[in-house]
């Protein structure tokens, strides 16, 4: 059981480039989330999914897209990277509403 | 809307001393409260949660927290800390209408000195 996996671990982009952060879980969890972590600001929810085909915006969705075609995968797309998107990104999954969230190891993204 | 305020950004303590990390929340509906811990260069893991029932919640690694509705607080305590407790701690709230989406506080860095 690998839990929640994220790739890549580190990424450097130039302003305007696009990329996809990958997230996968093998626990058959319905709920999945993407957060960004910035110093002194805690974790802020970007996008959220309650099941395959269903996504919702979180607190800071601008500049990011998501889709959920399978239960296992929840990729996060940066459409046109900006320096303000330099952050550490965490994916999380949970089995039920209000259940424990299981976090991946994170992706550290730098946008130059 | 819901929000969380962690009152201390950094808490230094000596090993074997007690510690309290403070968390206040606001929500217009019933709340569900969580404490997560993040060790350096890792993701977060759940310490404990309050959903209903007893207001004193016990978690892993000897931590406990008390839900106080009148003070809108959910402070985290440990009677005797270890060096290995050095980490960042996050309080989080999920409100009744948020469908389980968590709002996190800013984090408190606990540093345990020998």
Image: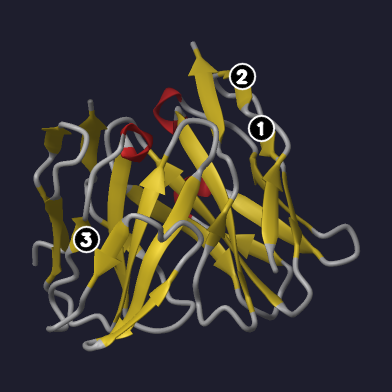
Gap between marks 1 and 2, in whole Å?
7 Å
Using the image as rendered, state which of residue A64 and residue A37 is in the foreground: A64
The quadrant holding residue A8 is top left
Residue in view at x 66 percent, y 43 percent: B77
Query: In the rendered view, does B37 fall on the left or right side of B74?
Result: left
Q: Quadrant of residue B19?
A: top right
The residue at which mark 2 appears reads as: B13
- Nearer the observer: mark 3 or 2; the answer is 3
**Local secondary structure at mark 3:** strand
Q: Residues within 10 Å of mark 3 (few under 14, many from 20)?
A: many
Q: Secondary structure at mark 2?
A: strand
* Chain of the residue where label 3 is placed in the rendered structure: A
Mark 1 or mark 2: name the one nearer the start of the chain.
Answer: 2
Does residue A80 appear to the left or right of B15 in the view shown? Answer: left
Q: Residue furthest right?
A: B70
Mark in the foreground, 1 or 3: 3
Q: Residue at x 39, y 29 (%)?
A: B84
User: What residue does disc 3 label?
Assistant: A76
Instruction: Please give the name of the residue rendered at 33% of the width and 78% of the height, measured from the top-left corner.
Output: A49
What crowding class fits label 2: few (fewer than 14 Cα within 10 Å), some (14-19), or many (20 or more)?
A: some
Q: Disc 1 designates what residue?
A: B19
Compare residues B4 and A83 and report the one nearer the observer.
Answer: A83
- Coloration of the structure image: secondary structure
């Amino acid at each position: 059981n690998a839990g929640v996996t994220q790739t890549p671990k580190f990424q450097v982009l130039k302003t305007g480039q696009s990329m996809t952060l990958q997230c996968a879980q093998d626990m058959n969890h319905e709920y999945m989330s993407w957060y960004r972590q910035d110093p002194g600001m805690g974790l802020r929810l970007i996008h959220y999914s309650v099941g395959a085909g269903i996504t919702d915006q979180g607190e800071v969705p601008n500049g990011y897209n998501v889709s959920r075609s399978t239960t296992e995968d929840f990729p996060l797309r940066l459409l046109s990277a900006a320096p303000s998107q330099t952050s550490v990104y965490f994916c999380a999954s949970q089995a039920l509403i209000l259940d424990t969230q299981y976090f991946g190891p994170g992706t550290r993204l730098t946008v130059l | 809307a819901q929000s969380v305020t962690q009152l201390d950004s950094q808490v230094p303590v000596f090993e074997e001393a007690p510690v309290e990390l403070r968390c206040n929340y606001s929500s217009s509906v019933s709340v569900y409260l969580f404490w997560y811990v993040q060790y350096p260069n890792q993701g977060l893991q759940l310490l404990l949660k309050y959903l209903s029932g007893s207001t004193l919640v016990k978690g892993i690694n000897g931590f406990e927290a008390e839900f106080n509705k009148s003070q809108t607080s959910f402070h985290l305590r440990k009677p005797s800390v270890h060096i290995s407790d050095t980490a960042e701690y996050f309080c989080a709230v999920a409100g009744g209408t948020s469908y389980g989406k968590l709002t996190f506080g800013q984090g408190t860095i606990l540093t345990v000195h020998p």
